[in-house]
Amino acid sequence: MNMHNKIDFANYRPIITLGLATSAALGIMYTLPSQATAFSFAGDFEPSKWTLTNINADGSVDTTNAPLGIILTGGDNGSNLPGTTDWTISINSASEISFDWSYFTLDTPGFDSAGFLLNGIYTPLAIQDGDFSTSAVSINVITGDIFGFRAATSSNSDGTPVFRVYAYPPADVAVPEPSTILGSIIGLGFVAFFNRKLKN
């Protein structure tokens, strides 16, 4: 063996150890779930912290599938008058709420609707039977905001509006930060560099 190419592994051990430790630390730090990118009906958003409010409606909310999702059903009390069913929560800290949704109703399109509320302002998402989200809906909220979901009816007849809301991404999936890639690259870089040195 050419003595000029011989590497004393012991001399590099502290550097390799530092590189691997740095990689591990970065990997752990950057793969922690972020509140800004993961939403579910748990923790600060668990069902017990929400309030159901019916105004001229007999609607309800089914939380059986929480934290993965909920089903908000609007009114159909036969009054032939408008009504709303709201499920709302007071926000304790700044967050990004992201969700998918689907919608079902037997009523004529335009007579029922469903969507979300932010500080009393209603944003309809669904008006026609079979409507569903083609991409996640994301809303930024801050401390003190009142956020919620609404199922609305203009006639309280001909069938209920049914609004299904799904946590996005699913509540049982940890969401890594994009910078996870940085931790992986650094770790792989250290390993590849010293592997080449040792092979030489």
Image: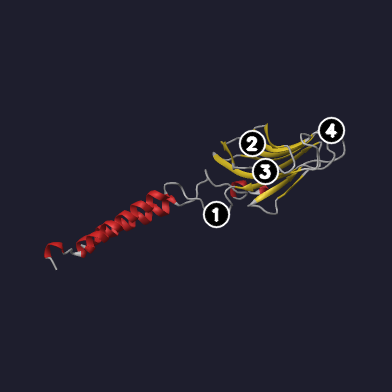
Label 3 to label 1: alpha-carbon separation: 22 Å
Mark toward the viewer: 2 or 3: 3
For mark 2, give the secondary structure: strand
Can you say whether 133 is above or below 15 in the image? above
| Marks 2 and 3, the one that precedes in the sequence | 3
The CA distance from mark 2 to mark 3 is 24 Å
Q: Is 105 in front, or is 119?
A: 105
Q: Please give the label number shown on residue 132.
A: 3
Q: CA distance from mark 1 to mark 4?
A: 42 Å
The one of 61 and 137 positioned closer to us in this rendering: 137
Task: Name the kind of residue labelled 1 in the image.
Answer: Val
Disc 1 is placed on an element classified as: loop
Point out which mark residue 81 bears: 4
Mark 1 or 2: the one toward you = 1
Secondary element at image label 3: loop
Closer to the camera, 133 or 94?
Answer: 133
Tell me how far mark 4 sits from mark 3, CA to CA: 26 Å
Q: What amino acid is at disc 4?
A: Leu
For disc 2, the neighbor class at 10 Å (few under 14, some 14 to 19, many from 20) is: some
Mark nearer the N terminus (3 vs 1)? 3
Q: Position of residue 126 (x, y in %)?
A: 70, 38
Judging by the rendered image, the residue that carries numbered circle 1 is: 173
What residue appears at the point 64 percent right and 32 percent down from the top-left corner? 119
Query: Residue tagged by mark 2?
Result: 146
Residue type of the residue flagged with mark 3 = Phe
